[in-house]
Image (cartoon, helix red, strand yellow):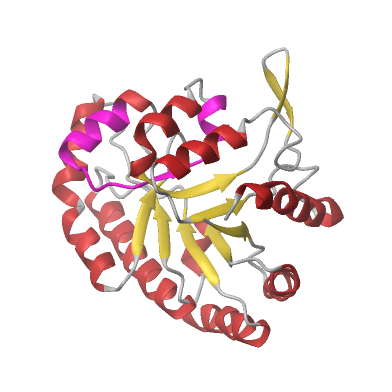
Amino acid sequence: MKLSFIGDNSLEGVESDSKLAAENGFDGIEYNFWGEFRELTLERVKQIAAIHQKYGTKAAMLGTWGFNPLATDPAERADVHKLIDRQIEFAQVLKAPWLVTSCGQIHGEPIGRSIAEFARTFPPILERIRKAGLKVAFYAVHGNSFLDTVATLERVWEVCPDLKLKYDPANWKDHGEDYLDLARRWGHKIGYVHIKDHMYLNGRSIAEPPAGMGDIEFPKVIAFLYQHGYDGYLSIEPHGGTWGRGELRRKNILLSKKYLEPMLI
């Protein structure tokens, strides 16, 4: 397994994070975009790649969030599919091996319709990703994703057995699902992993401290990943208004790395 972390998208942030990654032996930096991905230009991506080259760092993943590739409006759907093509192009420039994006959803319809439309719509997109030498994982439980329960995942895997999941234990716990059982039973379907901890009080998340300082049982998660032969990224996500900003963000990244490293070989 390899350690990465979610980077800042500004050029100043890319510079600072690349220095941090180089000085502390990280295997990559991931970049995520919501609606602002529409404004991301090829020139900006080339500038990010140049900063990586300067510090000897590399991109782990390029993610887009919130777009709906199953939109029922034809114009919106075509636009989102073009954005996926841009994501493929930009990932190649960054030399990021992984893409993460949404599988979409058809709002107001039974989940079976979204699954069937995904199975019909996505094979050409997946083939373009494969031909570009990239891998893709799909995120769950938010941001225009119909992957909202483990039961839904199991239905999808019946028709799309090669679909890989971007797995975030804290997101699944907050969603009311058994994140450990998901890793135990379906770890071979996990393509990319986010690491962020949550601290709970009276059943409510009250803080998002570095990994190992909250209530997510990461040693068990990693044990199940080993059992399934997972050898991909564990990407630290410095999240929230306290541990996701400023000096505490930096400490979050480094403390999480220090906690995780003894479990990695």
- The reply to whether the magenta stretch includes residue 156 is yes
- The reply to whether the magenta stretch includes residue 237 is no
Q: How many marks?
A: 0
Q: Residue farthest to the top?
A: 202
- Asked if residue 172 is positioned above or below residue 190 in the image, the reply reads above
- Asked if residue 165 is positioned above or below residue 40 in the image, the reply reads above
- Asked if residue 161 is positioned above or below residue 83 in the image, the reply reads above
Q: Is residue 143 visible?
A: no
Q: Main secondary structure of the magenta part?
A: helix
Seen in the image, is 217 located left or right of residue 150? Answer: right
Residue 258: x %, y % from top left: 74, 52
Asked where in the image residue 9 lies, by quadrant, the reply is bottom right
* The one of 218 and 127 positioned closer to us in this rendering: 218
Residue 137: x %, y % from top left: 38, 51
The span picked out in magenta is 152-174
Residue 205: x %, y % from top left: 69, 25
- Asked if residue 134 is positioned above or below residue 157 in the image, the reply reads below
Q: Which quadrant of the figure contains the C terminus?
A: bottom right
* The one of 61 and 34 positioned closer to us in this rendering: 61
